[in-house]
Amino acid sequence: MVIAADHVSKWYGQVIGLNDVTLEVSPGITGLLGPNGAGKSTFMKLITGQLKPSKGTIRVLGEPIWRNPALYYRIGFCPEQDAFYERMTGLEWVSALVRLNGVSGESAMALARQAIEMVDLADAAGKKIGAYSKGMRQRIKMAQALAHEPELLILDEPLAGMDPLARRRTIRMIKDWGRSGRSVIVSSHILHEIESMTSNILLINQGRILAEGNVHQIRDLIDEHPHTVHVKADETRALARALLADADVLSLKFESGALVVQTGRPDAFYSRLTAIAASGEFGAIHEVTSPDDNLQAVFKYLVK
Amino acid sequence: MVTSNRPVPTIMTTAVRIFELSLGQMLWSRRSVFLAFIAAAPVALAGLIRFATFAEPRLLPQINGERLDGTALFGLMIWLLYVRFIVPVLGMFYGTSLVADEVDDKTITYLFVRPIPRGAVLIGKYLAYFVCTALLILPSVVLVYFLLVPIGGGSIGRSFPLLAVDLGVLAAGIGSYGALFAWVGARLKRPLVVGLVFVFGWEPGVLLFPGYLKRATVAYYLQGLVPHTMPQEGGVNILFQVFQEVPPVPLSLAALAGVTLVGVWLAARATETREYVLEQ
């Protein structure tokens, strides 16, 4: 088992973050799906040893994780927060973190370069992180997580803010990582994202695991609900006109420089958006985000 | 592929790596820019005194019918500005924020999910603090020395050993205040408030009264190392009466070393065991 949680609860004072969770995660790619505040981040922090369970036990790769630094040789973690040493270049930052894994200077630099290439940031490796776009920042975070070639990669909302092409590349990379025999736990509040990486999901809401297993039944539910997507692009109006031509777009509006689209068929919409981004027809598409109220509606259905 | 059978590097090896990672961040932080201004203030003051006494030598105060010379002025500044104000203040601002800054910036996660003891993060950051603060304070002291000592015909060469001792005393102060506040910062939720009370309330307050309480201050032991003899007259005399009781040098050295080692150890231990909940 990659993760084994036995009656794990976590309280923050009077607030409960995770409530009596018992589960086992098998090797491979597993998606952790839940709206904001569901307990995803608490779960991620517990399985990465940043927090200690208030009750119960957690084992990662067969060992307890809390205060077990040796286990971090085998784990790579990409956190959700957009936090960096802004004055360092991407290469300096990743290699400095790899050095903390006991890798010496030259080898650390080589591993950092390799990881940065994997996330397609080689051209920007020498740039200061402060000058990176949101998508580039996400990718450099991924690079530091996988540079030391861990057995288990834990990714907290890794696709947030990425443009469609980077999103597609990252999804492919995560799948390749899984195919190479390593394990990945990836969290998201967007079913479509998780579904594109794995069919094995954990549904979490209000600190509890609601369901484990195959994604397809959940998928049928989500299709009944309009899915909202925010798109930031160079030519928002032209892009809006092109998107309106298709039946999967239910409504469109402009909100603080972004195009807000409601779609009834997220799969088809994301495919089309990726194709548009690749063609460059309407300039660059910088950022695609999806608020978690899509999933919130589905969860309301599930817990009814 | 690596396994967790691989041993975790020693605490000092990883502390050195954290030090390398942190020093640049610390040196170019907004806090350092602000504190550089504090460290520059005595230099500006010394420059002003030098300029004023060059124009009008009678401006120097007299004690027992003799004018204070540059060496005595330098000693006054070491005592009043550096030992009693700048070193504790810098120690407090940096020491309490060693881990807190990384927590506030949410970058601590990257360090805590590496195969290193958490205590090494604190120790590495403490070492970076020490070097960073020394780089801010010690050059300022040297400049003040060169500006003040020649006033009244003082010899830079002759009093140079005094400067070396002063630099050593300030380094000891940086080390011990930093360690103490590192522990406060690692242990408490509002470390800056505790630090301010300690530096501006407890230390000056307790030193004013006779008795044993002053032994619970860092300043008391630092005073035992300051080599300057203070002038003894009038208002100045009253001001320095409070500093007259000084411990012997070996006791001061042992006490400061103890504060430093125990402070760093307690801070590292607190960092090892504490959960850091980052705000979303």
Image (spheres, rainbow, N blue to C red):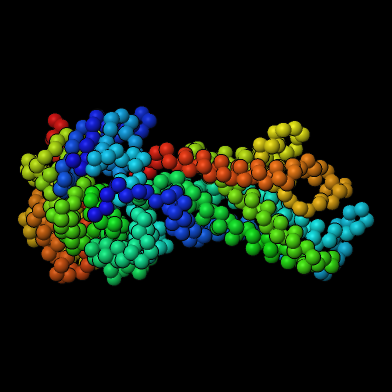
Residue B20: image x %, image y %? 46, 59
Q: Which is more toward the observer, A69 or A281?
A: A69
Q: Residue at x 27, y 36 (%)?
A: A58
Residue B143 relative to residue B128: left or right: right
Quick check: can you spot residue B237?
Answer: yes
Point out the image quarter for the N terminus of chain B. Answer: bottom left
Q: Residue at x 75, y 38 (%)?
A: B208
Q: Residue at x 50, y 37 (%)?
A: B188
A133 to A265, vertically: above or below: below
Q: Which is more toward the observer, B5 or A38?
A: B5
Residue A24: image x %, image y %? 18, 37
A125 to B114, vertically: above or below: below
Point out the image quarter for the C terminus of chain B. Answer: top left
Quick check: can you spot residue A83?
Answer: no
Residue B238: image x %, image y %? 83, 43
Residue A191 relative to residue B17: left or right: left
> How many numbered callouts?
0
Q: Quadrant of residue A21?
A: top left
Residue A173 relative to residue B26: left or right: left
Residue B261: image x %, image y %? 57, 44
Q: Which is more toward the observer, A185 or B172?
A: B172
Q: Residue at x 71, y 45 (%)?
A: B250
Q: Which is more toward the observer, A263 or B87?
A: B87
